[in-house]
Image: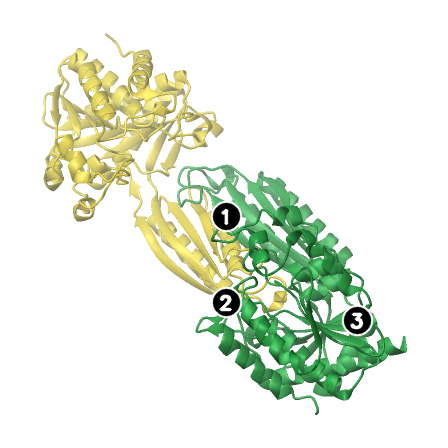
Chain colours: A yellow, B green
């Protein structure tokens, strides 16, 4: 039987019916509803004859053995945020199921093909995203810290994991799963407005952005709003305002793919009768190129220092978090481009702002690529998340072609 | 006996010893400590032979009858904020006591002279400043609202007033006290940096600023900081930042005496991974000239609308509070200038940013003027509030001269 992309859409609706409610998807990892979704998935895949296994980090694997132990992996995550959308994570899994069906029905493939349903991509319950994929990639380095994490009800992370058969102390044993992996493919909704604005259904992801995230604190002097002349003020908010406007110029100068965001400002004392003494700004900068990212950060720092000097205030930078850009495999990017052009006429290359499990797999050295399908209005993590059905069907076709081409390439290597 | 300005400084220290602690002055109106300060003041004035009376709003009056019922008033307030300074309010009262002593000892003056200790200038306990002076001025229009006010412990304002012999319903009977008032004089610390920066001990106050206070809300669109290209953002913070910088230009263009302050910004969702959807700004604009103030407000509104248009966001203005400028009496300003020049060599005219009881008296039609004495570092409402002792002594001398000149002018009119 040939590929039935329509079936993927129907199965996604079925999953939403089973595990969502009027507020959206409720498949939060390490909950009963999530377990129910995994059980449902098990039933869907069973008919293909794929072997199921759950690794030490709770990742659910379905393996169709081929002519070689070298494996092409297709990955996604069935977990969602609370009140989430019907596509984020689940599309990848269900499109993978359809591709697995086609491959299994075609008879023995030259290489092994595995579908993985990563455990806890979202980190919605314990605030630790990419749990399963980082364990498999061997990059989970925060187990001591994770041991202390609690959810909103006070349940400790290790206890919640244990209820689902996972022992935090041995989660890194999942590393063995990537042995023999020769390619990793992931389809995801874009979660942004780029493809929609270009009226394109599909795009190839070049990699995930490097991120520099800082708290930038300007410190001036509180002073009476009525009795302090303008030229005697040391206004911390002026520093914040100038930086907010400057980061847009920095992103513009840096060019395509650069984004800078001041996501929030906290002003103290923050009352109408006082000049602002302290302005704490949250700054997020992203780029696919590590050198460009470093230069954007340097420019923002230099600008903030110049503003502080001119305004006679102080500025201090504290790094909140950072990650290097993670680039996908050039060969697979070519194959993904071809696949998209075959099913949709034209393709577009774009970076991914959000992180994905694919980034962890790529970090582990497995050649990786992602496909993005258009998101309506760029919305995700809400029940309003949506994608046109014809685009979803095209995305399943593109993933299927990409899988075929990747299998052929691996087999020929 | 001649005027003894040194005695004023000593009595202020005595008052601080009696009613302050290691955190500063604690003479909050409608408390035991405040009542104790009023009792102490009563004792200080008794020796002058002035008649004491307490009016329907709780204001404490000391009257030295003269050759006419026309009266020159000297006013201040002995109440402070919690953890307040030793001078704000009390300097005026104690300098007035010293002037009253001198006048009483000189023998019958041509006109009546009255010292008034206004009740609850600060509004520290119930958030309603200028209580006693607004009742006497007949401008207290918010009694229905005041009836519902409670302090932090849940005590209702009318109950607290009753404990100090004041019935809120008849507080406006205090209006009778301003009958026959032909001049009102008030000395106050500047609470700002202007005189200190000019190395001048004393200045004449031209009036109190008109104030326009608004919440300005910019509304854009929350969007993922990683997946939303710069040119697809509708960033509410950009509107706030541009307005913060523009209000400084507006004040500069308007010229001397104009102040504009963005005292706080609240950003929502206010997280590092999202473009700001809503930025709520607190805007305070002040000027001594009503036309200039209206034009500053208009300029800020127009600018905000232009920024909103350019940024494809929305802007909304909500008035929090406003008050007209209140100008002091030109003749008394001349006399105050002369008095200051006589004791300190040179004088300076300046507006008052903060409101004072004098503004209420002026609004009631009584010719009014204020003297400012230099504040160190512009600080007030803190135990760090201070003024050089030699400047305090000069201020008592200047008030005394101003009282003499005003009495002569009223007597001659």
Q: Quadrant of the C terminus of chain A?
A: top left
Do callouts 3 and 2 mark residues in contact (Cβ within 8 Å)?
no
Q: Mark 1 — residue? A: B266
| Mark 3 closeness class: few <14, some 14–19, many ≥20 residues within 10 Å | many
Q: Is residue A355 above or below residue A303?
A: above
Q: Secondary structure at mark 3?
A: strand
Task: Please name whichever residue, B5 or B298, is drawn nearer the observer in this view of the structure.
Answer: B5
Q: Is residue B35 above or below residue A202?
A: below
Q: Say which residue appears at 65% left-offset and 59% top-offset.
A: B131
Task: Please name whichever residue, B182 or B251, is drawn nearer the observer in this view of the structure.
Answer: B182
Q: Secondary structure at mark 2?
A: helix
Label drawn at residue A309:
2
Q: Earlier in the sequence, mark 1 or mark 3?
A: 3
* Residue that protrudes farthest toward the top in the picture: A1
Q: CA distance from mark 1 to mark 3?
A: 45 Å
Task: Please name whichever residue, A161 or A390, is drawn nearer the observer in this view of the structure.
Answer: A161
Pointer 1 and pointer 2 on the same chain: no
User: Residue B47: which quarter of the image?
Assistant: bottom right
Question: Foreground mark, 3 or 2?
Answer: 3
| Mark 2 closeness class: few <14, some 14–19, many ≥20 residues within 10 Å | few
Q: Chain of mark 2?
A: A
Q: Is residue A281 above or below residue B101?
A: above
Residue A281 appears left or right of A126: right
Pointer 3 and pointer 2 on the same chain: no
Q: CA distance from mark 3 to mark 2?
A: 48 Å
Q: Secondary structure at mark 1?
A: strand
Residue A54 appears left or right of B182: left
Residue A45 appears left or right of A384: left
């Amino acid at each position: 039987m040939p590929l039935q992309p329509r079936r993927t859409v129907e199965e996604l609706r079925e999953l939403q019916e089973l595990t969502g409610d009027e507020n959206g998807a409720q498949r939060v990892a390490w909950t009963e509803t999530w377990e129910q979704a995994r059980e449902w998935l098990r039933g869907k895949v069973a008919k293909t004859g794929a072997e199921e296994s759950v690794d030490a980090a709770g990742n659910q694997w379905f393996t169709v053995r081929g002519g070689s132990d070298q494996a092409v992996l297709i990955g996604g995550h069935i977990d969602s945020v609370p009140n989430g959308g019907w596509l984020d994570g689940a599309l990848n899994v269900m499109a993978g199921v359809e591709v697995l069906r086609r491959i299994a029905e075609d008879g023995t493939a030259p290489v092994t093909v595995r579908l993985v349903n990563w455990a806890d991509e979202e980190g919605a319950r314990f605030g630790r995203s990419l749990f399963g994929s980082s364990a498999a990639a061997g990059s989970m380095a925060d187990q001591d810290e994770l041991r202390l994490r609690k959810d909103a009800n006070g349940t400790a992370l290790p206890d919640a994991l244990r209820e689902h058969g996972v022992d935090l102390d041995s989660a890194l044993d999942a590393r063995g799963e990537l042995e023999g992996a020769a390619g990793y493919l992931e389809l995801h909704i874009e979660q942004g407005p780029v493809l929609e604005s270009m009226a394109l259904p599909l795009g190839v992801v070049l990699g995930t952005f490097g991120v520099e995230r800082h708290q930038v604190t300007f410190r001036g002097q509180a002073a009476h709003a009525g009795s302090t002349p303008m030229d005697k003020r040391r206004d911390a908010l002026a520093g914040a305002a100038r930086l907010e406007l400057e980061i847009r110029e920095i992103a513009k100068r840096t060019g395509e793919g650069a984004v800078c965001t001041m996501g929030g400002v906290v002003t103290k004392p923050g009352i109408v009768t006082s000049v602002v003494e302290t302005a704490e700004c949250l700054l997020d900068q992203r780029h696919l190129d590590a050198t460009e990212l470093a230069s954007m950060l340097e420019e923002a720092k230099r600008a903030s220092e110049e503003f502080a000097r001119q305004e006679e205030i102080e500025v201090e930078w504290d790094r909140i978090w950072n990650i290097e850009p993670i680039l996908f495999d050039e060969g697979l990017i070519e194959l993904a481009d071809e696949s998209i052009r075959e099913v949709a006429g034209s393709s577009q290359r774009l970076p991914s702002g959000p992180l994905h499990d694919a980034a962890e797999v790529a970090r582990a050295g497995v050649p990786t690529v992602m496909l993005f399908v258009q998101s309506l209005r760029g919305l995700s993590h809400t029940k309003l998340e949506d994608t046109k059905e014809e685009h979803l069907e095209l995305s399943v076709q593109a993933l299927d072609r990409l899988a075929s081409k990747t299998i052929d390439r691996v087999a020929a290597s």
